[in-house]
Image: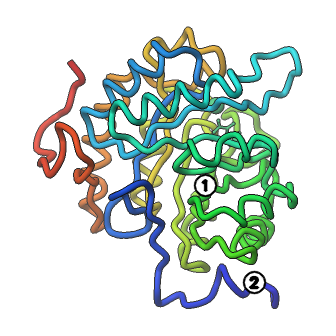
Amino acid sequence: METLQTAKKSLDHKTEVSIGENIVCGGKQLLIIAGPCAVESEEQIDACGAALSKVPVQALRGGVFKPRTSPYAFQGLGEAGVSILKNAGNRYGMPVVAEVMSAEQLKIAVDSFDVLQIGSRNMQNFELLKAVSHTRKPVLLKRGLAATVDEFLMAAEYIMAGGNTQVILCERGIRSFDSHTRNVLDLGAVVSLKQLTHLPVIVDPSHAAGRSELVADLARAAVACGADGVMIECHPQPLKSVSDARQALSLDEMSELIYSLSLVASAVGRTVQTSRTGPWAGGQLTEKIIVS
Ligand code: PEP
Ligand code: MN
């Protein structure tokens, strides 16, 4: 495709996306993002931050503007949620990742979020892509529910064409004829994207699987096939999650998963990042980690 100028150029030089002060995505170290589907309350996010900051999770996620299929479903806490998330990030020294669905929400959130997530449903919202392209914040661009790899790359191109080169691609499963899993995790696309572009590629196994018991194995498979990181939904009381309850890991399950991810990472020449300030700063992952 002749217009793919930015995403494909300089393949010999991989783009490393900087998040917060000392997190990098796209280098040897994996980026692990975890947190609930939605920010529900200060207590809920605080419990997540307290547990996840004890293990090598580099960034805290939580939606405050939620794209819900039904207009009657919980739409997120909105502006009130922005400060709840940001304060938890500050309290636990973790950068925060959250979705924006419009240019108006971007104005409210741009100074508070460390990574701007563009959700699957908005991958081809070109005005939104242009709006984030004018910021200098890292963008986590999720693949559309039924987007081809070329369309995905073109969406990334919109962001880079506007001057923001800090783009992380995220495979989160695509629609297929089979609804056995919520979506079909396209790891072939992950391998291909790594060969086609210089951008980091991460995987969200939670929205792909739709069921918590599938998430850990898919996360390990993602790391094994070369993903630069994973984003995983977890919750202090998974079955009480107001959205996506069925796919949420408990905080203990999330923490245990990191140990096995670190083993797979070392098998493929990667490491789990332990440089974030906190109890794990510079620490060694030598044994199973359980959040106390
Ligand atoms: C999310 O990450 O909260 C989300 C809504 O994901 P997706 O856009 O992939 O459905
Ligand atoms: Mn979700």
> What kind of residue is marked 1?
Leu
- Taking the image as shown, residue 124 lies to the left or right of residue 56, namely right
Q: Of the two numbered discs 1 and 2 on the same chain, state the one appearing first in sequence.
A: 2
x then y, percent, for residue 95: 43, 45
The amino acid type, in three-letter code, at marker 2 is: Leu
Of residues 268 and 92, which is closer to you in this image? Answer: 92
Q: Which residue sits at x=72%, y=46%?
A: 119
Label 1: state its secondary structure.
strand
* Spot occupied by residue 17 in the image (x, y as percentages of width and height): 48, 66
Picture quarter with the C terminus = top left
Residue at numbered disc 2 = 4
Q: Residue at x 49, y 35 (%)?
A: 215
Does 292 sit left or right of 6 as displayed? left
x and y percentages locating residue 115 in the rendered image: 55, 51
Q: Position of residue 67 (x, y in %)?
A: 78, 33
Q: Does the residue labelled 2 lie within 8 Å of ligand 1?
A: no
